[in-house]
Image: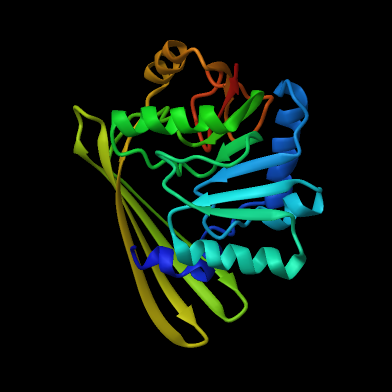
């Protein structure tokens, strides 16, 4: 396991720019408008340190978090214990997993769908199909790529108490034909005057809009609900040129 995923505290700080309560408001709006079933049990795939856990617990949902990092899940479980949350955590690969029960709602955030090939993309959706109840929604944040794929570098800093984390995120293509790209993450940490650096590199398969629609249509177990820009249901994609954090919603049939 890479160094970044062994350090959930710093990882959580690195991505703490999100307004968790506001985003859960959007998820509840999505459920209210598009789910065909009531929702009480939710599944987060690639949950990491489970930054949304406390907000979901406050709203009385049963939370299931799935991740491949034992360190992340231990951190998340300790968080759940501290607030007495109704939660469970599963150590599993999101490209091929199962659960003992079905869930009402499933979601992936910040482009964390880590399928490394078309075959893994298929088994991922097979897995979600098995665990998601008919009528339930599958919510994907930044998992479909709507802009031309070029090499890119982005960097930002976040501070929490005596800890400062500078994050650098870089992407570049490895195989354009198979749509495989490399994703590199570097956390430069200053914790109470002590400096540390953590690195992580992964490979992933990019998914483009028309390909995604054909993929879903061919499966017969999901239906396409829609996609919107920047977590805003008043901004359907197709009516904007500048795209940021696009969301895509499917429904299990």
- In this view, 252 is above or below 197: above
Q: Where in the figure is residue 28, as x and y percent of width and height?
A: 75, 36
Quadrant for the C terminus in the image: top right
Q: Nearer the viewer, residue 116 or 41?
A: 41
Residue at x 61%, y 42% (from the top left corner): 43
Residue at x 57%, y 33% (from the top left corner): 131
Tell whether 174 sits left or right of 129: left
Q: Where in the figure is residue 235, as x and y percent of width and height?
A: 63, 25
Residue at x 38%, y 24% (from the top left corner): 208
Image quadrant in which you'd find residue 123: top left
Q: Where in the figure is residue 63, as x and y percent of width and height?
A: 68, 49
Image quadrant in which you'd find residue 88: bottom right
Quadrant for the N terminus in the image: bottom left
Tell whether 67 sits left or right of 172: right
- In this view, 211 is above or below 109: above
Q: Nearer the viewer, residue 245 or 199?
A: 199
Image quadrant in which you'd find residue 24: top right
Tell whether 226 sits left or right of 193: right
- The number of numbered badges drawn on the structure is 0
Q: Residue furthest bottom?
A: 193
Asked whether residue 54 is in view, the answer is yes
């Amino acid at each position: 396991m890479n160094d970044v995923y062994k350090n959930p505290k710093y990882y959580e700080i690195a991505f703490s720019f999100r307004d968790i309560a506001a985003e859960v408001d959007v998820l509840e709006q999505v459920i209210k408008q598009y789910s065909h079933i009531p929702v009480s049990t939710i599944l987060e795939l690639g949950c990491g340190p489970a930054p949304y856990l406390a907000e979901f617990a406050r709203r009385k949902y049963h939370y299931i978090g799935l991740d491949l990092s034992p360190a992340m899940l231990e951190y998340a479980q300790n968080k759940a214990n501290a607030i007495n949350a109704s939660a469970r955590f599963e150590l599993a690969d999101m490209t091929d997993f199962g659960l003992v029960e079905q869930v009402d709602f499933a979601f992936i955030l910040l482009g964390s769908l880590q399928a490394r090939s078309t075959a893994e993309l298929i088994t991922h959706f097979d897995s979600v199909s098995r665990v998601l109840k008919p009528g339930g929604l599958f919510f994907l944040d930044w998992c479909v790529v709507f802009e031309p794929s070029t090499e890119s570098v982005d960097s930002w800093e976040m501070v929490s108490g005596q800890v400062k984390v500078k994050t650098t995120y870089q992407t570049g293509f490895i195989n354009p034909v198979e749509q495989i790209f490399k994703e590199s993450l570097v956390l430069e940490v200053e914790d109470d005057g002590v400096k540390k650096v953590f690195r992580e590199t992964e490979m992933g398969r990019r998914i483009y809009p028309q390909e995604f629609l054909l993929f879903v249509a061919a499966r017969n177990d999901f239906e396409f609900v829609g996609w919107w820009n920047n977590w805003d249901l008043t901004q359907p994609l197709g009516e904007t040129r500048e795209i940021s954090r696009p969301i895509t919603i499917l429904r299990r049939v």
